[in-house]
């Protein structure tokens, strides 16, 4: 997957189209990413011994998005990601729009 944890991305499709955020988690096998503040859902949590009153009840959390619905942001615009091998043999991600390293 070309998108990694910590990348700034923009949502291309769905109810949060146009929203930007930082990637919190990446699930490569499921091809999904969790973006901060995007695709929020409410979850009901039961109280137990570990979770006292404040942590139980209804919480909002980010749900995973498919990786095809997000793109890395460069200068406020979505960019495609490519790879380049440097002279020393290291593989780096580059922006297809500008050619700069990401």
Image (cartoon, rainbow, N blue to C red):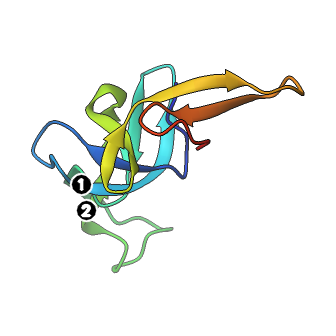
Residue 95 relative to residue 33: left or right: right
Residue 82 seen from this side: yes
Extreme bottom residue here? 54
Looking at the image, tell me whether mark 2 or mark 1 is earlier in sequence order.
Answer: 1
Residue positioned 37% across, 58% down in the render: 36
The picture places residue 48, in percent across and down from the top left corner, at 41, 64
Residue 86 relative to residue 84: left or right: right
63 vs 24, nearest the viewer: 24
Closer mark to the observer between disc 2 and disc 1: 2
Extreme front residue here? 98
The picture places residue 68, in percent across and down from the top left corner, at 31, 26
Residue positioned 61% across, 24% down in the render: 83
Disc number for residue 43: 1
Place residue 45 in its image quadrant. bottom left
Residue 16 relative to residue 83: left or right: left
78 vs 64, nearest the viewer: 78
Count numbered badges in the picture: 2
Q: CA distance from mark 2 to mark 1?
A: 6 Å
Extreme right residue here? 88
Residue 95 relative to residue 40: left or right: right
The picture places residue 16, in percent across and down from the top left corner, at 15, 49
User: Tag 1's secondary structure?
Assistant: strand
Query: Which residue has dot 2 on it?
Result: 60
Residue 59 vertical placement versus 7 (above, below) = below
Residue positioned 24% across, 68% down in the render: 57
User: Tag 2's secondary structure?
Assistant: strand
29 vs 74, nearest the viewer: 74
Residue 45 seen from this side: no
Disc number for residue 89: none
Density class for disc 2 (Cα within 10 Å; few <14, some 14-19, many ≥20) is few
Asked if the residues shown at circle 2 and circle 1 are in contact, with their CB atoms under 8 angstroms apart, the answer is: yes
Residue 98 vertical placement versus 87 (above, below) = below
């Amino acid at each position: 997957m070309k998108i990694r944890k910590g990348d700034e991305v923009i949502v291309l499709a769905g109810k949060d189209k146009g929203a930007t955020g930082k990637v919190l988690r990446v699930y490569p096998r499921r091809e999904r990413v969790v973006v901060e503040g995007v695709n929020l859902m409410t979850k009901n949590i039961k109280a137990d011994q570990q979770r006292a009153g404040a942590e139980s009840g209804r919480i909002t959390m980010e749900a995973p998005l498919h990786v095809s619905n997000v793109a890395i942001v460069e200068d406020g615009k979505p960019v495609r990601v490519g790879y380049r091998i440097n002279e020393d043999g290291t593989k780096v991600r580059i922006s297809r729009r500008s050619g700069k390293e990401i």
